[in-house]
Image (tube, rainbow, N blue to C red):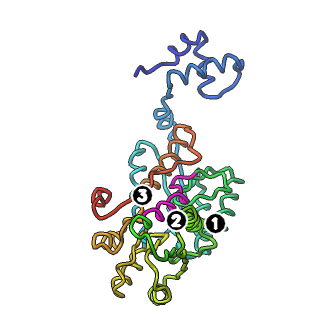
Amino acid sequence: MKKYTIKDIAQLAGVSKGTVDRVIHNRGNVAKDVEQKVRALLEEINYQPNLLARNLKNNKIFNIGVLIPDPEIDAYWAVCIDGINSALAEFSAFDVRINTFLYDPTDTADFLIRNEHMLETSPDVILMVPLFYKEATSVLQHYQSLNIQVGTFNNQITSSSASFIGQDLYQSGRIAAKLLHSISKNGDMAIIHIDEKYKNAVHMQEKEKGFKSYYADLEGFESSILKCKIKYVETEDKLRDFLNAHPNLEGIFVTNSKAYHVARLLEAEHKTHIKLVGYDLISQNVNYLNSGTIDFLIHQNPRQQAYLGLKYLIEHLVFDKQIPEKFLLPIDIINSENVTPFLRP
């Protein structure tokens, strides 16, 4: 591909080099029709200004705030750190500085405290996981009032202007239902939410809606769709009581990465005939997938979500690229036969 100089563009457009320079750098003082002509030509030749050299020359420092759940509390988030580091490595030529703040994914107060600490670092842009709908909506409105660009991943707050990278959670709920229906035609189905406040967790609500909608559309399904919400400290006892109270249960859908809790109990209670679908390739889930107690896992690819989220923000800062409002990743269905390639870094 030919690299066009400002002189080349000026000759092609029939204008002066100064006019082209003013259009490229948005300096104004160009007639509207001339500006439109130059911009059309720039788009046609896919012109990319040498922002790398310009930013290195100006010694520009970019500060990015990152607010994500603590991997020490929930292992699901550990690979997000890998994704963030991969994006940073890609832009090592620039002085991009990351201030990462980890919050307890079960504690809304901690989320707000860490958010305040992050704002004290004066970030140019922010990458965050907005787990708690009410609190996240409030902080996102505050970011908008400060004119700070925000990228979110894993959970979308549709009422905000923040960009989003993740999956169609409603559709993933329908896929979970389709998977269970394909291996268990009769009996009751259960949706199990573990360790998150359901009323404040939009991602769980969307998955549940999708799951229920599949069975609502299914002709001839006359069994029950049950629901169970469990706090981590009561997981085993409440799960056991739930299983004993519903002897016709044939399938379970766990809406987050905690399916291994259910799998462990199904084995202990000798109820592995109950089909189980969950999320995410954390080691405990993969072990039960390989043993056959978990039938399917839906891969949400948190590493890629974090990588793309940070990549788009850095490109916005460095190259003035527009950030996609929404970027949806494929919904990968994993079983014991195809899991190995997905575990490679």
Q: Main secondary structure of the magenta part?
A: helix
What residue lies at 63% left-to-right and 66% top-to-bottom? 133
Gap in Å between the C-alphas at discs 1 and 2?
Answer: 19 Å
SS for dot 2: strand
User: Which numbered disc covers residue 301?
Assistant: 3
SS for dot 1: helix
Residue 324 colored in magenta in the image: no
Residue 178 colored in magenta in the image: yes
Q: Amino acid at mark 3?
A: Asn
Q: Which residue is mark 1?
A: 133
The residue stretch that appears in magenta: 164-179
What residue lies at 47% left-to-right and 51% top-to-bottom? 329
The crowding category of the residue bearing disc 3, from other C-alpha atoms within 10 Å (few below 14, some 14 to 19, many at least 20), is many
Report the mark closest to the observer, 1 or 2.
1
Q: Is residue 154 left or right of residue 340?
A: right
The crowding category of the residue bearing disc 2, from other C-alpha atoms within 10 Å (few below 14, some 14 to 19, many at least 20), is some
User: Which numbered disc covers residue 21?
Assistant: none
Q: In this view of the protein, which residue sits in the foreground, 22 or 233?
A: 233
Gap in Å between the C-alphas at discs 2 and 3?
Answer: 21 Å
Q: Position of residue 70 (x, y in %)?
A: 47, 70
Q: Position of residue 106 (x, y in %)?
A: 54, 76
Q: Is residue 3 left or right of residue 40?
A: left
What residue lies at 53% left-to-right and 63% top-to-bottom? 218
Q: Amino acid at mark 1?
A: Tyr
Q: Which residue is mark 2?
A: 101
